[in-house]
């Protein structure tokens, strides 16, 4: 499939073409030039004049620098300018803020952007200040259909707005149950098979082995681990500008009670896993931890973090609530966008397709579970062959298809709301169950600020 925009003759050549023969010659000459224009939007959006030799500017966070290196090695013919930014981490919203500035200046947009957030398609797919949407439509011919179809089922849902795909997922961040098999066996504990059993084990650990952990609640993605996995409708995005928020349901209350119990008995402290305090205090004391797939490399098998020795770390499938099928939340994962303003869509598409699907990055280098299914299968085999894990990793693959679709991807950041509203309140000793109405109000207010109709 060709990725070159359909050639449209310039206005000057049309004026000069007084006969069919002259018109044919003019069109042929235009087609020989590397610069083309397709304002009619052959890919489903208006395009600027194209130049397939133009340098593309790529924005990445520091962790994605290896993706750029892999692409450069595979495609030395593509001219890149690379800029590093925070990736909108923890809901900083820097990606959106910077694009709004470029919209006002009518220039400066990068060709490709990586974001750690899954809610950026909600705004990047919409016009801003009278300017075209930043994100290029990817599923109308720009990215081959056979590539899109091989992403894990549901992986592109956060990228899809009104039936069109506006980004490609880098990796999935499905929540699984990580555990230290050596510690669990040594204490004589059975692996919990439900959230109820998990809570009961946390209460037992508090009595019998104080100081050991079964989880943490100090990071802004805490609701994505516990509430999303409980089917709490705190973030029910039902349309481009509509959301249902109900944090007082049974599903929300049970997750809140679980957190309150474990915070009170100190088996799930209100502390971030990425702080020196966490590593110093809890190295060798993490018995269990529900968390995303990327915890493996970021926390457990990381000399700068917990540095769990080989042969101890196991992984189990997402926990269900008793009598229900298991579902899981999703903690980040990352997304790649192509700019609709790009003057070299061909190169921009080549870049995002490579970094999301190529074995040279996704299998050989990437730390997280690839969203692209063929790469994910190979990634799992590579991880298992390392000899590091105490179990196989099939639970990660299974969890990838169990992400609950009742938690949407709106413009506003749930992580930012939680960090501002709930984390300080928990630190002050307040009950999460008691704070549920306050959390609901905070979500409602933030959604309305962003133009949402809230039910």
Image: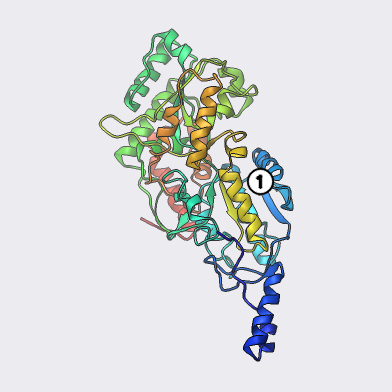
Q: Residues within 10 Å of mark 1 (few under 14, many from 20)?
A: many
Residue 185 location, x and y as percent?
Answer: 42, 10
Residue drawn at the location 64% of the way across and 90% of the way down: 19
Judge whether 211 appears above or below 111 on screen: above
Could you say which is closer to the camera, residue 417 or residue 107? 107
Q: Is residue 277 above or below residue 226?
A: above
The local secondary structure at tag 1 comes to strand
Quadrant of image for the N terminus = bottom right
434 or 207: nearer the eye?
207
Q: Across the whole image, how many numbered discs are drawn on residues? A: 1
Q: Quadrant of residue 52?
A: bottom right
Colour convention of the picture: rainbow
Left or right position of 261 against 211: left
Where does the image place residue 342, in percent across and percent down from the top left?
65, 62
305 and 82: which one is in front?
82
Name the residue at 64% across, 71% down. 37
- Which residue is most to the front? 21
Q: Position of residue 442 (x, y in %)?
A: 46, 48
287 sits to left or right of 89: left
List the residue tagged with mark 1: 60
**Residue 96 found in image quarter:** bottom right
Is residue 218 visible to the viewer in this orientation of the structure? no
Q: Quadrant of the C terminus?
A: bottom left
Above or below for 435 versus 341: above
Q: Residue at x 72, y 70 (%)?
A: 33
Q: Position of residue 101 (x, y in %)?
A: 66, 61
Q: Residue furthest left?
A: 323
- Does the image show residue 391? yes
């Amino acid at each position: 499939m060709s990725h070159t925009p359909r050639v449209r003759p310039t206005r000057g050549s049309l004026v000069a073409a007084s006969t069919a023969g002259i018109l044919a010659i003019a069109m042929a000459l235009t087609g020989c030039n590397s610069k083309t224009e397709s304002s009619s939007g052959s890919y489903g959006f208006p395009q600027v004049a194209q130049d397939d030799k133009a340098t593309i500017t790529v924005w990445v966070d520091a962790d994605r620098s290896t993706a750029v290196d892999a692409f450069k090695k595979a495609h030395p013919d593509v001219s890149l300018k690379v800029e590093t930014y925070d990736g909108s981490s923890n809901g900083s919203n820097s990606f959106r803020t910077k694009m709004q500035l470029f919209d006002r200046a009518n220039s400066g947009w990068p060709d490709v952007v990586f974001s750690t957030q899954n809610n950026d398609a909600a705004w990047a797919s919409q016009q801003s200040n009278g300017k075209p949407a930043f994100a290029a439509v990817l599923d109308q011919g720009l990215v081959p259909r056979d590539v899109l179809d091989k992403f894990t089922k549901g992986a592109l849902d956060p990228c899809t707005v009104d039936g069109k795909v506006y980004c490609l997922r880098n990796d999935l961040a499905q929540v699984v149950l990580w555990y230290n098999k050596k510690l669990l066996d040594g204490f004589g504990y059975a692996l919990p098979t439900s959230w109820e059993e998990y809570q009961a084990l946390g209460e037992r650990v508090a009595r019998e082995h104080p100081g050991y952990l079964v989880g943490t609640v100090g990071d802004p993605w805490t609701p994505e681990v516990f509430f999303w996995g409980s089917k709490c409708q705190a973030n029910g995005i039902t349309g481009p500008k509509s959301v249902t928020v109900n944090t007082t349901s049974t599903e929300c209350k049970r997750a809140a009670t679980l957190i309150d119990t474990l915070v009170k008995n100190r088996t799930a402290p209100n502390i971030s896993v990425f702080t020196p305090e966490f590593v110093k205090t809890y190295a060798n004391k993490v018995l269990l931890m529900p968390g995303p797939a990327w915890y493996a490399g970021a926390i457990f098998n990381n000399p700068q973090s917990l540095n769990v020795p080989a042969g101890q770390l196991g992984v189990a499938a997402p926990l269900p609530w008793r009598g229900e099928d298991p579902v899981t939340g999703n903690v980040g994962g990352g997304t790649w966008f192509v700019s609709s303003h790009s003057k070299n869509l061909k190169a921009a598409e080549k870049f995002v397709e490579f970094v999301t699907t190529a074995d040279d990055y996704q299998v050989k280098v990437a730390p997280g579970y690839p969203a692209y299914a063929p790469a994910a299968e190979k990634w799992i085999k590579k991880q298992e062959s390392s000899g590091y894990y105490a179990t196989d990793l099939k639970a990660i693959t299974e969890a990838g298809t169990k992400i609950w679709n009742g938690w949407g991807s709106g413009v506003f950041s749930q992580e930012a709301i939680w960090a501002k509203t709930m984390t300080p309140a928990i630190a002050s000793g307040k009950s999460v169950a008691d704070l549920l109405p306050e959390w609901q109000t905070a979500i409602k207010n933030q959604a309305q600020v962003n133009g949402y109709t809230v039910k």
